[in-house]
Image (cartoon, rainbow, N blue to C red):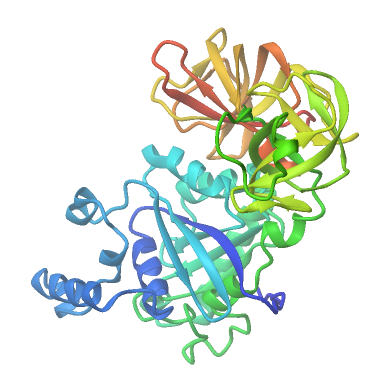
Amino acid sequence: MTTTPVTTTTKTLLRFATAGSVDDGKSTLVGRLLHDAKAILADQLEAVTATSRERGFLGGEFDFALLTDGLRAEREQGITIDVAYRYFATDRRSFILADCPGHVQYTRNMVTGATTADAVVVLIDARTGATEQTRRHLTVVQRLGIEHVIIAINKIDLLGYDRAELERVEAEVEALAAEIGLEAPHLIPVSALAGDNVAETSANTPWYSGPALLELLETLPSKEENTADLEPFRLDVQSVLRPQGGLAPGLDPEEYRDYRAVTGQVTSGRVHLGDEIDVHPAGIRTTVVGIDTADGPLESAGAPLSVALRLADDIDTARGSVLAAAGTLPQPRKELRAEVFPFTTEGLRTGDRVLVKAGTTTVKGIVTVESRRNLATSQIEDAEVLAGNDIGVARVKLASALPLPDFREHGRSGGFLIIDPQSGGTVAAGIHAPEEE
């Protein structure tokens, strides 16, 4: 499959996650990507070279996986356990990479890493093709609504760069993606160890006409580029600011006497001076008369900036309140229908009493499990229990109504956590999905 990248003219930020089954070579691919992007310091290169030689890696050659597996247990076992975040840049773009583990018991980590990603790279061993864990990872990214999915078919060197064999694997992967409901994933044949089609297209695959992995990552549009000025404004209130000392930068002393602002991070969209906004749960519409930051006042502010907003009216806006552009606040609901991703071995079951944390709000809730996805067949099955690493649908009755949008349309604002009220531990992640698909 070939792709036509979108050309960018400014240096922007892309968040992407990597996932793959155990032994598919994901850590090696990430290490190779960082190495070829010149994102590794000289002393780290020397240390990895020495360790590779000591362990007799392929006769002393460089083990790229050691560049990414930072935990001692990861290095000793040759596996990835936790999400590791890497920051690097090329001449064209800056990146935040979430390297997710491949084992089934760490699927929750993959959900965590992929939630905020603009793109996800799912690795497949060309010799074995798609596995059940591949299906699991692709299902997760499809349910999370990740716009850009890249399937890297790795270890093509071990197939002798056989075009017919690679086309067979590609056909299998495309059929699986269609079955799951993924639209037009990017397929790239790579060799993480040899470097084929990682940073540059390879002469070993003359039949492949698409971009190298790094080139594609450099040119994919990010969420911020696509939606910064298109998504409606929303802010979850952290606190109310009534300072007692020192003058905030840029504020008039007379105005400061009655200073009152609501603080929080802009979760989506952009707010301007003079904009009308709706306040939940007060149910009142007001106007923004000031936008303050640590560096001084602004005319406008967009996600993900943290701000203090001064409002025209003195409204009860305690922590947990939601501010949104006038007319865009979702209808508050006392029952949520959600895709849920259990994080614990015990999972979720019908009747569980939980806490639901959405934004800065935490309310009590009762869970009713409706169904689970059979990851071997992609079929929906009736269920009353969701075990750890299952994916399913549940309804949660809430003690107080929450104005959550559809996650697949508005991302972060439609997500929430399900918490055990006794231990305080996170039981599951949920994404609001109000409409049956």
Q: Nearer the viewer, residue 29 or 190?
A: 29
Q: Nearer the viewer, residue 28 or 232?
A: 232
Q: Nearer the viewer, residue 310 or 187?
A: 310
Give x and y (percent) for residue 30.
40, 66
Q: Count the labels in the image.
A: 0
Quarter of the image with the N terminus is bottom right
Query: Can residue 46 be seen in this snapshot?
Result: yes
Specify the quadrant of the image occupied by residue 108.
top left
Quarter of the image with the C terminus is top right
In the displayed structure, 193 sits above or below 288; it is below
Query: Can residue 437 be seen in this snapshot?
Result: no
Q: Residue at x 63, y 43 (%)?
A: 144
Horizontal relation, residue 361 to residue 34: left or right: right
In the displayed structure, 421 sits above or below 197; it is above
Q: Residue at x 14, y 70 (%)?
A: 51
Q: Nearer the viewer, residue 267 or 398?
A: 267
Give x and y (percent) for residue 377.
58, 39
Horizontal relation, residue 108 to residue 27: left or right: right
Specify the quadrant of the image occupied by residue 159.
bottom left
In the displayed structure, 202 sits above or below 74; it is below
Q: Residue at x 53, y 40 (%)?
A: 376
Specify the quadrant of the image occupied by residue 435.
top right
Most extreme residue toward the left is 54
Most extreme residue toward the front is 254
Give x and y (percent) for residue 324.
80, 35
Give x and y (percent) for residue 131.
46, 51
Horizontal relation, residue 323 to residue 141: left or right: right
